[in-house]
Amino acid sequence: MLTTTNQYKLNKSISKGWTTAGLNLAPANAAALATGRPRLGTVCPMAGACAKACLQYTGLNQLTTHAAVRVNRTVQLLDHWDETIATLIAEIRKLKSKHKKFAYRPNLLSDLPKLAHELASALPDVQFYDYTKIPRPWERTLPNYHLTFSYSERSSWAEVEDCLAHGINVAVVFNRRKGELPRKYRGIPVIDGDKHDLRFLDKPGRFVGLSFKGALAKLPAAIESGFVLEA
């Protein structure tokens, strides 16, 4: 099965009455590096400092066996796109039939709009959602595809303001080791994005505050780069 149905953050949705699943690919250019095939390129076109603090370095994701599965899955998608999309559609349809409230995140560790759009268009009765670092996300939403913009050191404040003006919330990684999230950041309300992953339930006009998930030793560099903000 290509779909991931058991992940710490996804499982938090259960408390809200939802079942969520998603697709775990090898982030950024990990598949290209692992296979020695540079033409595979990257599945995260806006990757920057986040690549060093990616969720692939946390929990069970760190295991070499899990990394190998992600690489194989990514190669399968990129080499056999149509066949893999068809398989994913069948998996999602089957999962949806078993749950009253079901949502799917196509890009758990990637940022591929084409992937999300093909799945969401094929399954209009399924709620899809993602985080994205690619600017102007409001141009890529669909009635059943919700996007949250992920702020990084490569983002501009103008891009953030544009997202908020178009009803797109902005996820920000804060240094929470110093305490709780701020109630507001730059005058904009902050909600706790670590409580669950159901971003399509969030009210618009918000920052989605997230904690740094990487190793503690990587935190200073993440702060210095601008990827992690001080609350």
Image (tube, helix red, strand yellow):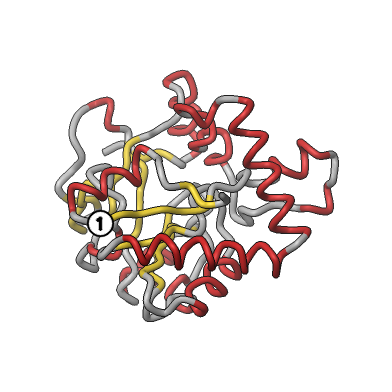
Which quadrant of the structure image shows residue 146?
Answer: bottom left
**Residue 96, horizontal then vertical, whole percent:** 37, 65
Q: In this orientation, which residue lies closer to the viewer: 141 or 63?
A: 63
Number of numbered labels in the structure image: 1
| Residue located at (76% from left, 36% from top) | 34
In this picture, residue 60 sits left or right of residue 195: right
- Quick check: 124 above or below 111? below
**Residue 202, horizontal then vertical, whole percent:** 23, 62
Q: In this orientation, which residue lies closer to the viewer: 213 or 164?
A: 213
| Residue located at (48% from left, 28% from top) | 60
**Residue 17, horizontal then vertical, whole percent:** 19, 55
Question: Which amino acid type corresponds to the residue marked 1 in the rendered image?
Answer: Trp
- Quick check: 22 above or below 69? below
Q: Residues within 10 Å of mark 1 (few under 14, many from 20)?
A: some
For disc 1, the marked residue is 18
Q: In this orientation, which residue lies closer to the viewer: 161 or 181?
A: 181
In this picture, residue 25 sits left or right of residue 222: right
